[in-house]
Amino acid sequence: MTVAAKKIAVTEQRQNWAESAIKAAAERQAKTLPQAALKLAQDARAVWAKVLFPTPRQEDWKYTNAEAIALGSFSLAPATAAALPKDVLSRIEIPGLNAHRVVFVDGAFSEELSSLPNEKGVVCARLQSREEAPFGALGSHSSEAFAALATALMSDGISVTVSPNASASAPLHIVNVATQAGEQSVVAPRLLIDASEGARITVVESHVSIGAAKYLSLPVTEIRAAQNATVDHYRLQNESLDAFHVSQTDIEQERDSQVRSHVFSFGGRLVRNNVSVRLVGSNCNAVVNGLSLLAGEQHVDNSTSIHHVEPSSESREHFKGVYADASRGVFSGTITVDQIAQKTNAFQSNQALLLSPNASIETRPQLKIWADDVKCTHGATVGQLDSDAMFYLRSRGIDRETARNFLVHAFASEVLASVQVEALRQHVEGFVTRKLDGVQVQERE
């Protein structure tokens, strides 16, 4: 077979499963989706047909090879939720999190396991039942390949609308559970958070697995914060080590709004988190933080974009990663400041802790500044456990494992300190401790 013929064969194989899944999704969408959502899926299919799977030849994907996804054999997950015993759900919930709950099992909504909010000022509805819900309004499906694929495949989702000056009485917990029944499936969970003027809400997304299923998850979350609104958003990803996860989070903020978004990545074989923030009003405040803890041959890529459109807004971005064994991290962050956006204050930092000589991190912080009266800083550091600190702790009678865990927790503390939900913060801290128990560390001589 010639080189040209091989390239054609690989291209056809790459498109094969996606085309089949999109065809199955289109048939399902025609029966279940309202007209606006149906039109959105159709537009996304047209975009996907042009872009297809990204490759490392593209600058945004230079350090992450999606070939294992492209050459996979995934099929659209069933439309009905598999049975999930309540005792199983209790084991994957976040202890102490007093929250309303929305549960999707292998991408399908489970009414039995969900407890949607029923309070004044907060409307939580499924994609299938809301013709007017503006899913896709932030438009990532028109430029991001996997966002286009996810939108072309969507069959259900949740929209959360908070009325002007209303505050949700409790957090909303979106639980996406993958089971062994979802082996070799592709799911595209959809979430829209629409906070009206002066509204306040906290949303926690959990992406978890029961068993070791191999599947592809393509979640898309859109957050719209109107004037003076406050949104706290957390994504906790702890999926099967055979799973693939490519997420898209799009945030748009109007004047005087505040959005805090956190991404915690612990599971998955290959994970890519795309976060896009547009500050389209003055005096906005955006916080975008992330924490990854990887082992084995896990790969996590965090790609962020923060765009200051109007003056006098502030953004703070802090991503930290702990990498053991032969795991690999990637961070690519871009801050753009338009010429009109004077008095912008933007901070970006990426820090990596390598627990093994075989672990690695690629980091690319970038600033694109067209204004002259701004305060913008960025930086990246990569290091290992401090041998002096280890020696100090060991000399005080602390065993090696406890000393190691103490230093890793101290490293992660800055990201965890910004978590506003105490139960979630404790849950993440506990998970970090448990995962570290199985990690071997090679210290510097």
Image: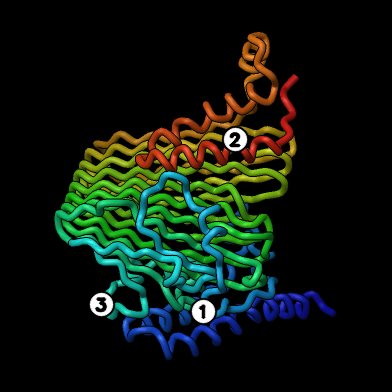
Q: Earlier in the sequence, mark 3 or mark 2?
A: 3
State the quadrant of the C terminus: top right
Q: Say few, some or many: other residues with alpha carbon within 10 Å of mark 1 (under 14 / 14 to 19 / 20 or more).
A: few
443 in relation to 245, above or below: above
Please indicate whether residue 182 sits to the left or right of residue 414 in the image: right
Residue 251 has which mark?
none
Q: Position of residue 287 (x, y in %)?
A: 35, 43
Residue denoted by label 1: 80
Residue 51 horizontal/vertical position (percent): 53, 73
Of badges 3 and 1, the one in the foreground is 1
**Tag shown at residue 132:** 3
Mark 2 surroundings within 10 Å by alpha-carbon count, few (fewer than 14), some (14 through 19), many (20 or more): some
Task: Determine which residue is flagged by label 2.
Answer: 433
Tell me which amino acid carries mark 2: Thr
Distance between the alpha carbons at the discs numbered 2 and 1: 36 Å
Quadrant containing the N terminus in the rendered view: bottom right
Between residue 87 and residue 191, name the one nearer to us: 87
Mark 3 and mark 2: span between their CA atoms? 44 Å
